[in-house]
Image: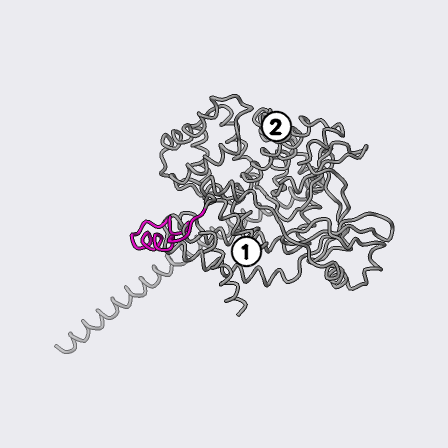
Amino acid sequence: MRFVSRLLVILWTIWRFGLDDLALSGLSQRRFQLLRRITRLGRRWQEPRGVRLRLALERLGPIFVKFGQVLSTRRDLLPLDVSLELAKLQDRVPPFPAALSRELVERAFGRPLTELFASFDAEPVASASIAQVHFATLMDGREVAVKVLRPGMLDVIDDDLALMRQVAVWVERFSADGRRLKPREVVAEFDMYLHDELDLVREAANAAQLRRNMDGLGLVMVPEMHWDLCSPEVIVMERMKGVPISQRAVLEEAGIDIKKLARDGVTIFFTQVFRDGFFHADMHPGNIQVSLAPETFGRYIALDFGIIGTLTEVDKDYLAQNFIAFFQRDYKRVAELHIASGWVPPETRVDALESAVRAVCEPHFDRPLKDISLGQVLMRLFQTSRRFNVEIQPQLVLLQKTLLNVEGLGRQLDPELDLWATAKPFLERWMNEQVGWPAFNKQLMKEAPRFAQLVPELPRLLHDALKNQAQRRGDAELKALVRELRSTNRLLSGLLWGGVGFAAGITLAWLALRFLDLGL
């Protein structure tokens, strides 16, 4: 009954916002177009399709809002107007009761709240689709933030995901455009993100890793986790005090250098991507603050680590070479990199792909660098790449979405921000560190502890190697001798048995002649 009632709510919302009309508009068959004309009778919508889709997802609740947020990252698959509208989705979720929040914390740690905290604010400071946050004070006086997972989330998510999978199957079955959008893959990706976010220990581990990576950079702060107070349902972290980055007027009044702040954001992003291959992939303004404390004045404060992107060394090298090729307008190199990476079928013509990339990039390069959107260039490239059957890598789609966030955030702070000029020296320096003497020295230092253990053992290892080699050589010679002896034995045996046979033949012939003589 729960499944059926939820399905009815979804169907009514689809009808209310005309999502059925959106789906039928992508079906070219005559019967579907006739059905569309029938269902449109008496219904009119003032809002564009992207707005209607966003409003419907907000009406359906937090899980569908989260789905829309994830879907907005797939700009390689969605029409531009729809993806831009979905990017406006925010978690507008009322908090659950404070008494329930206290109960969940006590259940997670098996102790009364009064034994865990000196004080606990009943009113949440933030409430999102997955969890809500309360401020508290530990017994030793340290201020903390307590993140509590919403109760019953797993059942709600599983029910809605089951419906989404079924809808995805229908879309793929009846719509050619639907099949191109790969709805089942999108739902599967959403499933993975959601279940990762439902484990708050995973988020705490992400924060700890990011904190270690950023230590020493002096540009961003990440809250420290209190591991003795972390569970899959509740995590306790250091309380961070800052001003939301969207409040530009407050930051300017406090004396923050806004232009430097914008450049620092770009530096932080490229450091996480190319140096560490581990980046905060949910960098919207709600998760970014700026510290006004004297000792950390002007530093970024990062929050909410449920979605983290990772890149391999191969991914980083590929991206850096692509970016540098873009800067140099070497479109043939870009095409060759796509083919060499295996993302494009090997039979793809380099000149055809080069021409397509040139058509995307040249209109941007004719403008001043500060007016070029790196994120938009990547988005156009992803859209163009469908013609060449390019396999879109999920980790790079997440990277593109984060890059769009960073670029948009930076230009909100500083409309004159030149992302290309900020990124190019960083990328060139990073590439120089990957080749030649600096890279060799870095790898040597990395392997030094292992070498230090092996050097004292070298004489023994050399002796063992020579001994084994001599033994193997002796074994080989012995085996060759045995083979020769066996060959000689077979030859002698053949001669012996041949002689015996010859003698036996002579004897039989002599006996036969004697028998004939006697018979005569």
- Of marks 2 and 1, the one in the foreground: 1
Task: Give x and y (percent) for residue 499.
Answer: 31, 62
Q: Which residues are magenta?
A: 22-45
Does residue 303 sit above or below 266 in this rendering?
Answer: below
Does residue 511 sit above or below 198 in this rendering?
Answer: below
> Residue 315 sits in which quadrant?
top right
Q: Name the foreground residue: 37 vs 128.
A: 37
Left or right of 10 on screen, residue 258:
right
Picture residue at 87% right of the left edge, 51% below the top: 140
In the displayed orientation, state which residue is furthest to the front. 42
Residue 426 is tagged as 2
Left or right of 503 on screen, residue 275:
right
Amino acid carrying label 2: it is Phe
Query: Which structural element holds mark 2?
Result: helix
Tag 1 residue: 60
Q: Name the foreground residue: 396 vs 413.
A: 413
